[in-house]
Image (cartoon, helix red, strand yellow):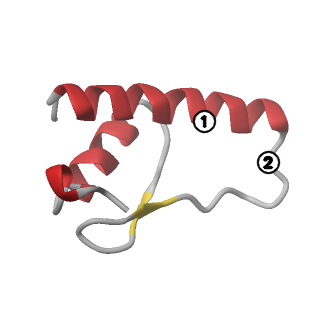
Amino acid sequence: MLNDAWAGKAKTLSNLAAEEGVMILIAGANVVRFAPALNVSEEEVNSGLDRVERACARFVAGVSS
């Protein structure tokens, strides 16, 4: 759940994540979630989390698409 400072901006974060090559789901204006495949490898999880981390850093810095 996004905090008050970023309320209503789940779509922005989702778009930034997509630009980084990872899909996150929007579960309301303030909520994002992950739904990885059940057979995802540890390497794929780590790669995906790296991409999400970059998207979050851009989001916090105020960069949007």
Horizontal and vertical percent position of residue 4: 18, 58
Q: Nearer the viewer, residue 6 or 26?
A: 6
Which residue was labeled with disc 2? 40
Q: Is residue 7 positioned above or below 59 on the image?
A: below
Which residue was labeled with disc 1? 48
Horizontal and vertical percent position of residue 55: 37, 32
Q: Is residue 53 positioned above or below 24 on the image?
A: above
In the shown orientation, is residue 55 left or right of residue 3?
right
Q: At x 48% / y 36%, what residue is drawn? A: 52
Other-residue count near label 1 (Cα within 10 Å), few / some / many at <14 / 14–19 / ≥20: some
Residue furthest out toward the front: 4
Task: Identify residue type, mark 1.
Answer: Gly
Q: Is residue 39 positioned above or below 51 on the image?
A: below
Choose top left, top right, bottom left or bottom right for residue 56: top left
Choose top left, top right, bottom left or bottom right for residue 46: top right
Give the distance between the C-alpha atoms of the residues marked 1 and 2, in whole angstroms: 10 Å
Q: At x 30% / y 74%, what residue is drawn? A: 28
Are the residues tagged 1 and 2 within 8 Å (C-beta)? yes
Task: Identify residue type, mark 2.
Answer: Val
Q: Secondary structure at mark 1?
A: helix
Other-residue count near label 2 (Cα within 10 Å), few / some / many at <14 / 14–19 / ≥20: few
* Mark identifier at residue 14: none
- Which numbered disc flags the more N-terminal residue, 1 or 2? 2
Horizontal and vertical percent position of residue 26: 36, 65
Horizontal and vertical percent position of residue 29: 23, 69
Q: Nearer the viewer, residue 46 or 40?
A: 46
Quarter of the image that includes the C terminus: top left
Q: Secondary structure at mark 2?
A: loop
Residue furthest out toward the bottom: 28
